[in-house]
């Protein structure tokens, strides 16, 4: 199975003081141990790195980048950027970002139904938020995730 990782999950995973940190850490361990393919985009990484640098400094950024080994980074093409920008302008909402909209387009393009995120916009746009029950329910027994 495939999961898309949003900035909200990256920040929760890195920041031990984030309200979602315990759940983010637990879900990350489950995703890895159950063999899920984990994706993010270059846009999400730019957003995440900017937040981490501003809040915590470069040493935290370096540690974060070293931990990305199991993650497949998708590059937003001109086509996905244009579709994301069109969605962003069409929605015309202050709390919905261009990064979110390009993430939705990337997920649709790649056939990714699950978002490892703490941002309800993903659910609002038809994606399932990763939680323990859907990791177990969507992992084939041969992947080590069977119960």
Image: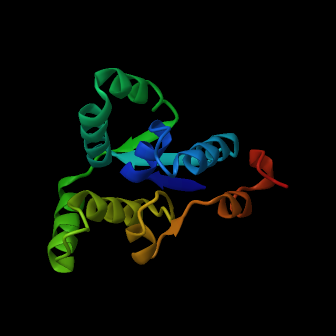
Give the residue at x 28% y 41%.
51
Q: Position of residue 109 (x, y in %)?
A: 37, 63
In the rendered image of this protein, does residue 120 appear above or below residue 32?
below
**Quadrant holding the C terminus:** bottom right
Q: Is residue 56 left or right of residue 123?
A: left
Question: Which percent across, then down, holds residue 75?
Answer: 29, 46
Viewer-nearest residue: 56 or 106? 56
Direction from residue 65 to residue 54 in the image, left or right: left
Question: Where residue 59 appears, x then y in whole percent?
Answer: 34, 20
Which residue is nearer to you in this view: 97 or 145? 97
On the rendered structure, is 36 left or right of 112?
right
Which residue extends farthest right? 147
Residue at 32% x, 30% y is 56
Q: Residue at x 60, y 55 (%)?
A: 1
Could you tell whether 144 is left or right of 129 in the image?
Answer: right
- Residue 84 appears anywhere in the view: yes
* Numbered-mark total: 0
In this rendered view, identify the residue nearer to me: 140 or 17: 17
Establish if 124 lies above or below 111.
below
Q: Give the image quarter of residue 89.
A: bottom left
Based on the displayed image, in which of its 4 quarters is residue 86 positioned? bottom left
The picture places residue 138, in percent across and down from the top left corner, at 68, 62
User: What colour-coding does the image apply?
Assistant: rainbow
Query: Which of the pair 39/119 is nearer the observer?
Result: 119
Residue 6 in view here: no
Could you tell me which residue is drawn at 23 percent across and 35 percent down?
54
């Amino acid at each position: 199975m495939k999961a898309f990782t949003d900035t909200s999950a990256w920040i929760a995973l890195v920041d031990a003081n984030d309200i979602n940190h315990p759940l983010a850490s637990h879900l990350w361990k489950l995703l890895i141990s159950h063999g899920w393919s984990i994706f993010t985009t270059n846009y999400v990484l730019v957003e995440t790195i900017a937040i981490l640098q501003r809040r915590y400094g470069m040493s935290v950024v370096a540690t974060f980048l070293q931990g990305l080994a199991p993650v497949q980074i998708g590059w937003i093409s001109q086509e996905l950027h244009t579709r994301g920008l069109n969605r962003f302008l069409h929605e015309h909402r202050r709390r919905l970002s261009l990064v979110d909209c390009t993430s939705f387009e990337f997920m649709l393009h790649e056939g990714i139904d699950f978002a490892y995120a703490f941002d309800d916009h993903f659910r609002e746009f038809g994606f399932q938020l990763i939680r323990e029950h859907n990791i177990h329910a969507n992992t084939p027994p041969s992947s080590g995730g069977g119960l």
